[in-house]
Amino acid sequence: MFSARTGWDLTPNRLSSLLEARRKRGDAVLDLTETNPTRVGIAYPPDLLAPLAGPAALSYEPSPRGLASAREAVSADHARRGAPVHPGRVLLAASTSEAYAWLFKLLCDPGDAVLVPRPSYPLFAYLARLESVGVHPYALSYDGEWHLSRDAVREALTPRTRAVVVVSPNNPTGSYLKRAEAEALLELCAERALAVISDEVFADYAFGPDPRRMESLAGDGPALAFSLGGLSKSCGLPQLKLAWIAVSGPEKWRAPALARLEVVADTYLSVSTPVQVAAPALLARRPELQRPIAERVAANRDALRRRLGRGAPASLLDAEGGWSAVLQVPATESEEERVTRLLEERGVLVHPGYFFDFPGEAFLVLSLLPPRDVFDEAVDHIIAVL
């Protein structure tokens, strides 16, 4: 009766079962998997959502690419990052997940494939499967910092590959795409007539400047490229459901991509009018909204680094940005055993490295968003168990 696309194994794993049981008992959980900025005690300006109630939001005049005023605000935000893109090359979606779904529809037939980085966020496999598209990993390498290699991408290509996904900064490694890496990737994709999908949702959360960094793939490079962003991370407002796609590359590919995407977007018309009307005002407050998030992330990362000094049983992998920290820990037990033991014995919830497809053990992934007292107590428990 049901589609094979949704034929997942829905049996709860051991960790999720333990977590559910603990919460049913009312036991405390020190949650270091929390990445929702609206649930970690960060204060938002009380007048922030006022633009959603403006009179213009009462009029419904659907535009497939999105309201011009919202797309102009996105264009201006790209220009701020040093990657100007014309508003006519911007399309609005309800989320980056929806943007991926649209792009997989645009680029792939059933049975085609996209390449995704390894390690990276596991959502790609679900999004691709729902479009009957395969996912093949290409390996990021680590030698004190993470690297994207043209050779690793080329080796992962198959005759059915249609696009390469890059995430800058990567989730969870926090590594940015460097200019030399981007140029090599775009050249390879142009040669093979492949598209590049650049997920840039965490782009503003760098831990420091780096002149080697590629700020965005939005621009007139040699390959067709789609740069993704959204209010969820750029303004810490995941509940408002607004994301965007900036389309770049040679006119011969860019123009038909925009025309086809417009039909896809027109078929769904998923973005609400109020959030489009409010987008310019919300993006104008981006620095104010990002500041407390960036300060929380920096404070927790600094505290973690201090706790993992000389002689500590774990090491903090280098990162350039984002909201996560990756710990390399002794491989004295499996990641699954370690994370379940942390939850059972200490009430600490963390992600195992295999959740993000790390190529080997043993890693723990920690969100840097929780309140400082929660974070510090959880880290103390982790170190004690290690």
Image (cartoon, rainbow, N blue to C red):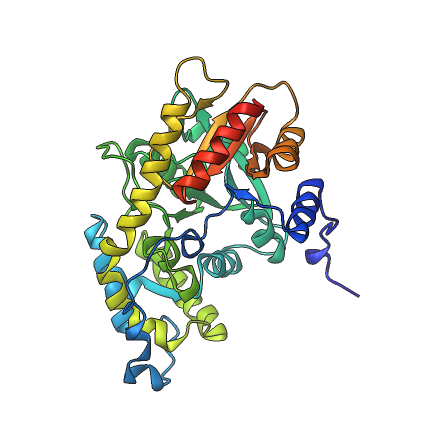
Q: Quadrant of residue 174?
A: top left
| Image coords of residue 63 (percent x, y) | 36, 77
- Above or below for 39 versus 191: below
Q: Nearer the viewer, residue 309 or 269?
A: 309
| Image coords of residue 295 (percent x, y) | 29, 43
Q: How many marks?
A: 0
| Image coords of residue 105 (percent x, y) | 53, 60
Say whether residue 326 is visible: yes
User: Which residue sits furthest right?
Assistant: 1
- Above or below for 240 versus 40: below
Residue at screen point 28% across, 74% down: 51
Report whether 135 appears left or right of 280.
Answer: right
Residue at screen point 50% across, 39% down: 120
Q: Quadrant of residue 311?
A: top left
Residue at screen point 25% across, 34% down: 208
Quarter of the image for the C terminus: give it.
top right
Q: Quadrant of residue 252?
A: bottom left
Quarter of the image for the N terminus: give it.
bottom right
Say whether residue 85 is visible: no
| Image coords of residue 297 (percent x, y) | 35, 41
Report whether 261 appears left or right of 354.
Answer: left
Report whether 285 appears left or right of 350.
Answer: left
Q: Nearer the viewer, residue 247 or 172?
A: 172
Q: Nearer the viewer, residue 25 or 118?
A: 25
Residue at screen point 53% across, 29% down: 382
Report whether 333 appears left or right of 288.
Answer: right
- Above or below for 137 versus 251: above
